[in-house]
Amino acid sequence: MHLVEPALTLGVEEEYLLVDTNSRDLVADPPRELMDECVRLLGDQVSPELMRAQIEVGTPVCQSVADVRREIKRLRGVIAEVSQRFGFAPLAVSTHPFASWAQQKLTERERYSALTAEMQATARRLLICGTHVHVGIEDNELRIDLMNQLSYFLPHLLALSCSSPFWAGEDTGLKSYRLTVFDALPRTGIPEQFSSFAEYERHVGVLVEAGMIEDASMIWWDLRPSTRFPTLETRIMDVITNLEHAVSLVALTVCLLRMLYRTRVKNQRWRVYANMLINENRWRAMRYSYDEGLIDFAKGVVVPYRELLDEIIEFIEEDADYLGCLDEIHNLKQITASGTSAHHQLHQYQQAIDQGVAHDAALKQVVDWLIEETVRDL
């Protein structure tokens, strides 16, 4: 079978939390004028989320990683500028350090009302944000095959993106607490393995026919074929506070997919491992980020993450060169050198505590850092 090379176009969705710059708490009920102004400036590239304190943005279709950088800068900049007029600021982060989910107000939309009616407290607790990366792969069969193979790397992506160490004012001990909240929903986690696109559609069809879901958009795996676009949608990553780190992780996602396509053309493939093994690495990434390494399944041992990253960069260097994002790929090492957002948040908190600052005030200092870091590279 002759394979047509996928377009590998890019689209990125980021979700932000809106905070009051005085209280540093979430804005549970922002004025309608704020969203109206964002829509006036950004059109359909901005939309409300489940909670009124959340704002989602999405880039247009991008041809390169450089395009993604430009668009994310523009989107973050507009949201920050409009928010500032109201005394608010956006946080590019997956959980707020101290806000209470129980005090949030839900967006009045039919889809969200149906979700909360069905899921109850598991939906009302979804005070979490994520990063979704779409990569254009038009061929249905290729999209499923690459989904099967990319699953191996999902924990590696998560480990570099962690930004949710706090929940409701508590240090959770995890670098990505977000996924423990999201995993309470059905149809989440590492995707199933399918031998063909038709097999995938048959399985989705069972749930649709049974009235469990309206369509495949209600399957919330860490990686899925998009229902809206001819893309493979990576959903495992936390929102990456540092813009340059976010761009590097977008680059990593598309380079991995091109590498997997390139090896498939040579009649080779990445070995597909059972979900029970991938889930072990997923948990390690949630708990430790990159600090304690991940399992190399071929060797059967835990390997320091920096060694794994060096190997991955070696695998994809040709693809990064082809896609014009070598700098962004090499910049991944800066994340393990300087820390993820989660590392920085914990450092900010501990530094404040060591200086005699009270717990609540220390958490507000974490919010201050997040406000600055979200717009630092604009």
Image (cartoon, rainbow, N blue to C red):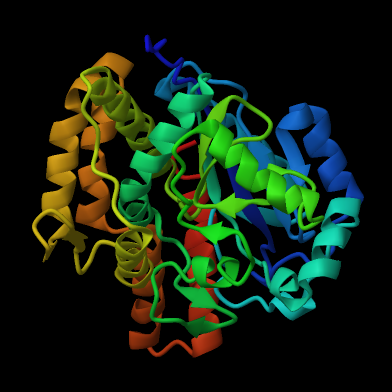
- Count of residue discs: 0
Examine the rendered structure and indicate whether residue 305 appears above or below residue 169.
above
- x then y, percent, for residue 272: 29, 46
Q: Is residue 196 left or right of residue 84?
A: left
Examine the rendered structure and indicate whether residue 344 appears above or below residue 48.
below
The residue lying toward the viewer, choosing from 305 and 84, is: 305
The residue lying toward the viewer, choosing from 354 and 188, is: 188
Q: Residue at x 21, y 19 (%)?
A: 266
> Residue 95, located in which quarter of the rendered image?
bottom right
Examine the rendered structure and indicate whether residue 89 appears above or below residue 272.
below
Residue 76: tell me if it is visible: no
Q: Residue at x 35, y 30 (%)?
A: 257
Q: Quadrant of the N terminus?
A: top left
Q: Residue at x 60, y 29 (%)?
A: 59
Residue 259: tell me if it is visible: yes
- x then y, percent, for residue 9: 49, 20
Q: Residue at x 29, y 52 (%)?
A: 273
The residue lying toward the viewer, choosing from 282 and 361, is: 282
Q: Is residue 230 left or right of residue 301?
A: right
- x then y, percent, for residue 97: 55, 73
- x then y, percent, for residue 86: 79, 52
